Amino acid sequence: MAVTGAGPIVNSLTAGKLPKGAPWMLLIGSWIVLGIVFLFVQLSHGTTTFNLVGSLFFGTVLFDVLIYVVSYLVEGVRRARDRLLTALVATAFIVALLPLVSLLYTVLSKGIARFDPTFFSESMRNIVGPGGGALHAIIGTLEITAFATLISVPIGLMTAIYLVEYGRGALARSITFLVDVMSGIPSIVAGLFVFALFALLVGPAVRNGAMGAIALSVLMIPIVVRSSGEILKLVPNELREASYALGVPKWLTVLKIVLPTSAPGIITGIMLAIARVIGETAPLLLVSGFTQSVNYDLFSERMMTLPVFVYQSYVAQGLHAEDDINRAWAGALTLILIVMVLNLVARLIARFFAPKLGR
Amino acid sequence: MNASAPAEVKMKVKVRRGDRVFATSTVVAGSLILALLAATAIFLVVESLPALSANPKLLPGAPANVWAYVAPLAFGTVWAGLLAMLIALPLSIGIALFITHYAPRRIAQALGYVIDLLAAVPSVVFGLWGIAVLAPAVLPLYDWLVKTLGWIPLFTGPVSATGRTILTAAIVLAVMVIPIITALCREVFLQTPVLHEEAALALGATRLEMIQVAVLPFGRSGIISAAMLGLGRALGETMAVALVLSPALVINFALLTSNNPSTIASNIALTFNEATGIGLNALVTTGLVLFVITLIVNLGARYAVNRRKAFSGAN
């Protein structure tokens, strides 16, 4: 207001503020600066390849400092601290993305070498050096996970139904509490439990696929209970009451009204639970052991699984270490693909088949 | 309203057979969980008893007694977990704030999915990545830390030649628990009453000040319980640590040397298949200790959540 004289007209609403694009320009500028620094490091033979991750990370840190100083000079201390926090939370996000991107890139680039038909059609029986595959491990993973699902889904789903539809009082409270406790059990302890159980019943040397499946279901049951419990609670009470009003007994109401309404959500929860346990290594390493041959029988002899295959190939490198490492990465790539597909399909089911409740 | 209720008609409640069968089977399923958890505790105790009463000379490494065998492992577990939390907690709170309060609405959910992707990666793959990519990558940084900050006990040399130190393991653990803590913090931050936030902004607060006075105080106990759940996860994590860490059975605070304390979980995974007899029982004993530690941490998280329920009058 009252801008008199010949000077340029100052907009009092934007005066004393950084221009809108300034932070972005600063960010890109600091990335470029650090990129140049690391380029010099590379040219002076400090490193063999261009350190992209380093320049992004340190560039972002430089940006955090710059934005604070610039904003402090132009806008004052309160805005500067605000901008600093904005920069810091963005930095936190970028820092968390770096390992994800690096990991996916590494697994893809190193795993693609052995991601061929042989890998999916041959086992490691009598294989020394190149060739061979993870057929035995894939079969083992599929069978053990399927058996674990077969155990966990009925128990988990029925427990969820009990907690939501029937459970009142002390038993329900203690089950809810113990499901929480159970979901915190470390996977290796689940493996030890199954080992201890079978060591007492059969003997300490017994290893087979079914033991692995039981260990996995210890991990899987609480996930199923929690996710399906949440979904069952979402079913509107009006539906149950309408069913009762028509004279339908409670168990049929649950089976024919509540479960179909919540089916997509329950399936999503089960798939996410499968995705969570299919990558478990520790319990299977303990109780299912490892082998080089295909074994279809869950109840006798050791059974290879994909995560154990990855671990074993990397740790127990033989004379032809290169081939073992390549197989390990190909296994890792397969595993990640399986988990990602399961996650994606689960989310798609949740999105497209979700019941249209209320408004 | 003409209340012509059919007076004094005694309805005989007939429980249908289907109802009875169904209700009973749900109770059985629920009770199975009770039994399973009790069985876990009982079998672990039974299998670990021989190690407690055995001659300690027979234990791996011939320690003075079984607790001298467990102590370094328990220390390593807690130490690695705490280091991981030190890295993961600030990052997770930052990410959660970024997704809930800073990122544009349209892409916020997509960004949340991206972080959730981290949770989908199996731990053995994290281990491979840690040993093949992260350890070599942080080695120059470790060299620099030992050279310039070596006078701090944490950073004493000599630096590990492989980069497979407890700090590297803690970084991998941090990356693994970030999605868990972030997801919980996000939910808590989203529950902040919008009126509180708008009131702060209307009084002229910057976004930082709004977060300081409205979001963080509201979410404090939620953050604590998220951190404890993340810690519980980090304590029990096996394969990543087993692959990344090159262990020695010691109690050692130095972060960057090759003389690292092992964790309970990774020690079990590494030595289980070679162990026999009393050695197996000793491993089960360490597993029992791990079970108790994670149980305490998880119960702590639960306690924090319950306290919050009692006090948050806002929702």
Image (cartoon, helix red, strand yellow):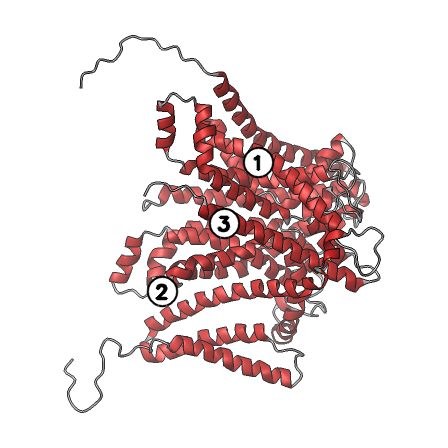
Give percent across and percent down for residue A299.
Answer: 75, 35
Q: Amino acid at mark 2?
A: Leu
Q: Amino acid at mark 3?
A: Arg
Q: Nearer the viewer, residue B8 or B233?
A: B8
- Structural crowding at the residue carrying mark 1, measured as other residues with C-alpha within 10 Å and reported as few (<14), some (14–19) or many (≥20): many
- Give the alpha-carbon distance from disc 3 to disc 1, as whole Å: 19 Å
Q: Which residue is mark 1?
A: A153
The quarter of the picture where residue B157 lies is bottom right
Residue at 36% across, 73% down: A80
**Chain ID of residue with mark 1:** A
Give percent across and percent down for residue A100.
Answer: 57, 62
Give above or below for A61 relative to A99.
below
Residue at 61% across, 69% down: B152
Q: Which residue is mark 3?
A: A347
Q: Which residue is mark 2?
A: B208
Give percent across and percent down for residue A227.
Answer: 50, 41
